[in-house]
Image: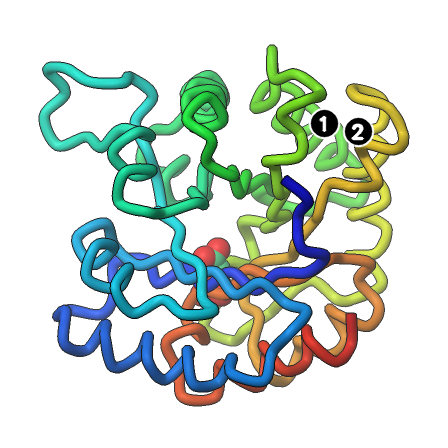
């Protein structure tokens, strides 16, 4: 399947607190995407809303926020890739820093990636350093995070992969301190180089790289015009009235 060229991923996290409110936000975003032609908008609500929102999609895609790696069995509370697929959902976020903070290791992330690709889901793989040191240690951190997440993932599967670069120190910041566009540009080139070393130049060039971490209407323009990315993953601002401004910027600037 040929991937669209640019993306806006809305990670709702554990919000909102009722299905009614979820529908209201979803329909608001749906209206905002009516004139959008070139950008894939993917909303990732909590699992329990996926099925109901699936009846309202029209122009919007749905993603899950996590997945379990086993196909079925005695795993209380877990949800498999085939269950997600069966709900009509095509994307899944894996390796989000908030899941890693709750115990997802690189090895677990790798198992989740492989299980999801096997079921035909498109994986939005989150990677990012906890701190950006001046000696550049974060670059080797990123390298091993990506290499281990994609361990034994074949070149053929890359067409179902999107990388979301999310520096952990920028995610969920109350002052919306995102990485600036120039630094992002360098990092996205670096991520492409990691992918090129693993899979070859053309595959690396075709894998979309998104930025996430405190994206809002003020900083989105510099991220998109300077950052050398194919879109954004938006947390808190994806629940706000003005989320559509970010979608419009991606549609216009990329
Ligand atoms: P934020 O979250 O936009 O609220 O910082 C981003 C994310 O989900 O990683």
Which quadrant of the figure contains the N terminus?
A: top right
157 sits to left or right of 116: right
Rendered image quadrant of residue 126: top right
The quadrant of the picture occupied by the C terminus is bottom right
Residue 76 placed where, x, y %? 9, 25
Instruction: Point out which mark residue 143 bears.
Output: 1
Residue for point 49% across, 81% down: 243
Q: Give percent across and percent down for residue 28.
A: 36, 84
Marked residue nearer the N-terminal end (2 or 1): 1
Q: Is residue 169 above or below residue 193?
A: below
Instruction: Judge the density around disc 1: few (<14), some (14-19), many (≥20) Cα neighbours within 10 Å.
Output: some
Mark 1 and mark 2 in contact (Cβ < 8 Å)? yes
Under circle 2, the secondary element is: helix
Q: Quarter of the image holding residue 99?
A: top left
**How many neighbours does mark 2 have within 10 angstroms: few (below 14), some (14-19), or many (20 or more)?**
some
Q: Confirm or reject: label 1 Cβ below 8 Å from ligand 1.
A: no
Q: Which mark is residue 205?
A: none
Q: Which residue is mark 2?
A: 194
**In the rendered image, is residue 172 in sight?**
no
Question: Residue 53, image x and y in percent?
Answer: 26, 64
């Amino acid at each position: 399947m040929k991937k669209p060229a640019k993306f806006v991923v809305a990670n709702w996290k554990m919000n909102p607190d009722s299905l009614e409110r979820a529908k209201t936000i979803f329909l608001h975003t749906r209206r905002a995407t009516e004139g959008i032609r070139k950008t894939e908008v993917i909303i990732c609500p909590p699992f329990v809303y996926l099925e109901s929102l699936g009846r309202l999609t029209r122009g919007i895609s749905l993603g899950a926020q996590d997945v379990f790696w086993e196909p079925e069995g005695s795993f209380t509370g877990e949800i498999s890739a085939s269950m997600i697929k069966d709900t009509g959902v095509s994307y899944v976020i894996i390796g989000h820093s908030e899941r890693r903070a709750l115990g997802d290791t690189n090895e677990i992330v790798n198992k989740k990636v492989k299980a999801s690709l096997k079921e035909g889901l498109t994986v939005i793989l989150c990677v990012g350093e906890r701190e950006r040191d001046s000696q550049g240690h974060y670059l080797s951190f990123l390298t091993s995070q990506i290499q281990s997440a994609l361990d034994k993932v074949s070149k053929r599967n890359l067409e179902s992969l999107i990388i979301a670069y999310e520096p952990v120190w920028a995610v969920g910041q109350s002052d919306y301190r995102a990485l600036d566009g120039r630094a992002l540009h360098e990092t996205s080139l670096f991520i492409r180089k990691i992918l090129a070393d693993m899979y070859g130049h053309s595959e690396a060039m075709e894998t979309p790289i998104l930025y996430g971490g405190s994206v809002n209407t003020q900083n989105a323009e510099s991220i998109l015009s300077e950052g050398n990315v194919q879109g954004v993953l938006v947390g808190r601002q994806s629940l706000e009235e003005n989320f559509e401004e970010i979608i419009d910027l991606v549609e216009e600037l990329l």
